[in-house]
Image: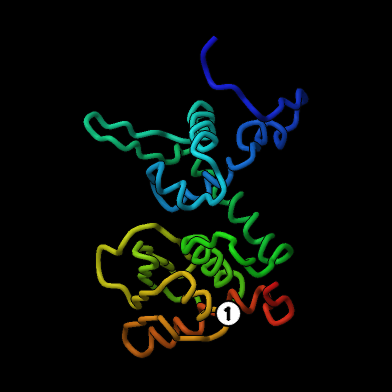
Amino acid sequence: MGGVTRNVRTYDHFCLVARALEGVGDRWSLLVIRDLLSGPKRFTDLMDRLGGITPKTLSHRLSELEAAGIVTADREPGRREVRYGLTPAGADLRPVVDGLREWGLRHAWRWPRAGEPLHGEHLLRSAIQAIDLAADDHRPARWHFRLDGADYLAESDGQHWSLTAKAPSGPADVAVTATTQALTAFIFAGSDAGLDLTGDTEPVQRFRRLIVALATVVAPAQTGPD
């Protein structure tokens, strides 16, 4: 009999938490969804972000999530690479992922360990969520990051921050070019080394003030690197 074999057990009782976990509770599933929340990705893009996953496991998870109506696969004729995105049901998991990240900021924070993968997109998403939590500055903003050769747009509408894996279509208030390691050092240690920061004086000063909110939320002085 064909079809995708499920790894997660069926709980076999009526509980909507259990029902939800039957759909997204497998190891890696929520992390795949996390990485698709910033926009569609190729298989290689997901492999780059999901340090430690094997191609076989990622293929299996994508097939499961597609069968569950959470992920969509754009298999355009003549194009070699498939692009994966979220269905409306998948996109509805954004507050779940944001809630887990907020809990992690408050209760599960630690410094990255030696050799542990640290992707720029994950650092930026934690940073903008920390700004939402800690900053008392809710004016609109557009920040363009180019980290390790990849573009990201962090944007505030005056209420909440969002992050998409793309370059801005128009001018940004601040443009940052750096490696992920250099941005990490800037956020947590205030080091400008390896950081190219451009923009008008006031937006740049505001950026410097807000981006360190992540360091404030997680209190790194009390929990230094291993």
* Residue type of the residue flagged with mark 1: Phe
The quadrant of the rendering that contains the N terminus is top right
Q: Position of residue 33 (x, y in %)?
A: 52, 44
Above or below, comparing residue 114 to residue 26 in the picture? below
Q: Residue at x 49, y 38 (%)?
A: 55
Q: Position of residue 125 (x, y in %)?
A: 51, 63
Rendered-image quadrant of the C terminus? bottom right
The residue closer to the viewer here, 55 or 190, is 55
The residue positioned 25% from the left and 67% from the top of the image is: 170
Towards the viewer: 185 or 71: 185
Name the residue carrying label 1.
188
Q: Nearer the viewer, residue 142 or 73?
A: 73
Q: Position of residue 3 (x, y in %)?
A: 52, 17
Residue at the (65%, 37%) spot, across then down: 25
Is 191 left, or right, of 97 in this rendering? Answer: left
Residue at 59% in and 74% down:
214
- The answer to whether residue 139 of the structure is visible from this angle is yes
Would you place residue 34 above or below residue 224 in this image?
above
Is residue 94 found left or right of 112 in the rendered image? left
224 left or right, relative to 52: right
Tag count in the figure? 1
